Image: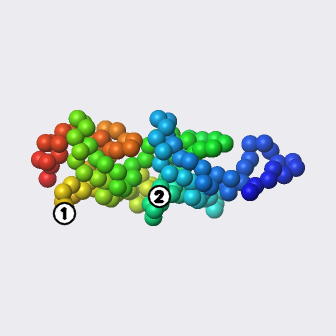
Amino acid sequence: MSVKLEGMPSNLATADTFTGKKVIDREGIGYGKVKHIHINQDTLTVSGVTIHQGFNKDYFLSDDYIDKFSEETLLLSRPPVRTGIPVTDIDQNKIGKVKRLHRHPDTDELESIEVSHGLMHSKILSKSEIWGIGEKVILRMTKEEFKNLE
């Protein structure tokens, strides 16, 4: 439990006050709870958070996803793509699930996703093929166009 110290500015808080808070986006979709806050050792600024989403499902979100910490929640500026969430086509037909995220090694920017469909099949799609993200990933194509991809 953190305590406000005498002389401490009102807009400062300790990092441990945010652990356990719900993580939501602008549409109210929940993504889990804050597990850790990561601090850049050189600049002493928040560089990201680890989100806990149930049994053994932790993932990292960089600071560009963070909009604001409120009293009870961490508000995200945009919804994150996560592994294990459903993938649908533009007409809401189920295609599969996000199997793996491919990020740029230097910037950690999402470059593509691997979508598993069927028992042993998967396809890699560029982030430009993603139309929307929320509780699921919506692609910019129909299911038939997805099937015809190499």
Residue at the (24%, 56%) spot, across then down: 116
> Mark 2 — residue?
54
Check the picture and name the quadrant holding the N terminus. Answer: bottom right
Q: CA distance from mark 1 to mark 2?
A: 26 Å
Relative to 119, residue 63 above or below: above
Instruction: Locate residue 130: give its quadrant.
Output: top left
Residue 66, image x and y in percent?
54, 45
- Front-most of residues 80 and 63: 80
Q: Given this view, does label 1 or label 2 mark the residue nearer the observer? A: 2
Judged left or right of residue 28, residue 14 is right
Which label belongs to residue 18? none
Residue furthest to the right = 6
Residue at point 44%, 43% (across, down)? 79
Colour scheme in use: rainbow
Where residue 10 sits: x, y (%)? Answer: 78, 42
Q: Amino acid at mark 2?
A: Gly
Viewer-proximal residue among 118 and 37: 118
Mark 2: secondary structure: loop
- Extreme residue toward the front, this view: 55
Q: Which residue does the image show at 30% across and 58% down from the upper left?
A: 99
Q: Amino acid at mark 1?
A: Met
Q: How far across and down, in percent of the image, does residue 57 sit?
A: 44, 60
Residue designated by label 1: 120
Name above or below for residue 73 compared with residue 97: above
Badge 2 local density, few (<14 within 10 Å), some, or many (20+)? few
Residue 91 appears left or right of 107: left
